[in-house]
Amino acid sequence: MIIDKNIAEVVKNFLENYTEVHGLPSPGRSTNRITQSIVFLLAEMSYKSVYRDFFASLEEDNKLKSLKYDVFRKL
């Protein structure tokens, strides 16, 4: 599978939405215009559980169903 900008954008949008729902803001760090805010996930969440949630959110015929875990982590 070739990773193009569209695939990276889909994963990025999923992760941004995921952090809005499940993320906790970093205590003690303020956000300025240069850096992005830091968001933490709960301790019981892992890269693998986020990948499973991403995979579950895809439609049945979506070509991203072939996106492997290792590639997802690197994006």
Image: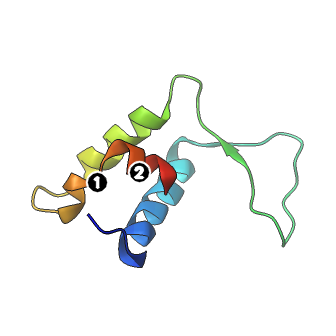
Question: Depth check: 28 or 9 in front?
Answer: 9
In the rendered image, the residue lying farthest to the bottom is: 5
- Marks 1 and 2 sit apart, C-alpha to C-alpha, by 7 Å
- Within-10-Å neighbours for mark 2: few <14, some 14–19, many 20+: some
Question: Depth check: 39 or 61 in front?
Answer: 61
Question: Where residue 36 appears, x then y in whole percent?
Answer: 74, 62
Q: Name the residue under label 2.
A: 72
Q: In this view, does 1 lie to the left or right of 8?
A: left
Question: Depth check: 17 or 70 in front?
Answer: 70
Secondary structure found at label 1: loop
Question: Where residue 40 appears, x then y in whole percent?
Answer: 66, 39
Please report contact status of discs 1 and 2: CB closer than 8 Å, yes or no: yes
In the rendered image, the residue lying farthest to the front is: 2
Task: Name the residue at 55% across, 49% down.
Answer: 19
**The N terminus: image quadrant:** bottom left
Question: Where residue 9 appears, x then y in whole percent?
Answer: 44, 71
Query: Three-letter amino acid code at disc 1?
Result: Leu
The image quarter containing residue 4 is bottom left
Q: Is residue 39 left or right of residue 13?
A: right
Secondary structure found at label 2: helix
Q: Is residue 43 left or right of residue 59?
A: right
Question: Is the residue 65 above or below the residue 40 in the image?
Answer: below
Task: Name the residue at 58% across, 29% down.
Answer: 42
Task: Name the residue at 81% across, 64% down.
Answer: 35
Query: Three-letter amino acid code at disc 2?
Result: Phe
In the rendered image, the residue lying farthest to the top is: 44
Task: Name the residue at 43% across, 68% down.
Answer: 8
Q: Which numbered circle lies on residue 21?
A: none
In the rendered structure, which disc, 1 or 2, sits on the residue that comes first in sequence? Answer: 1
Q: Name the residue under label 1.
A: 67
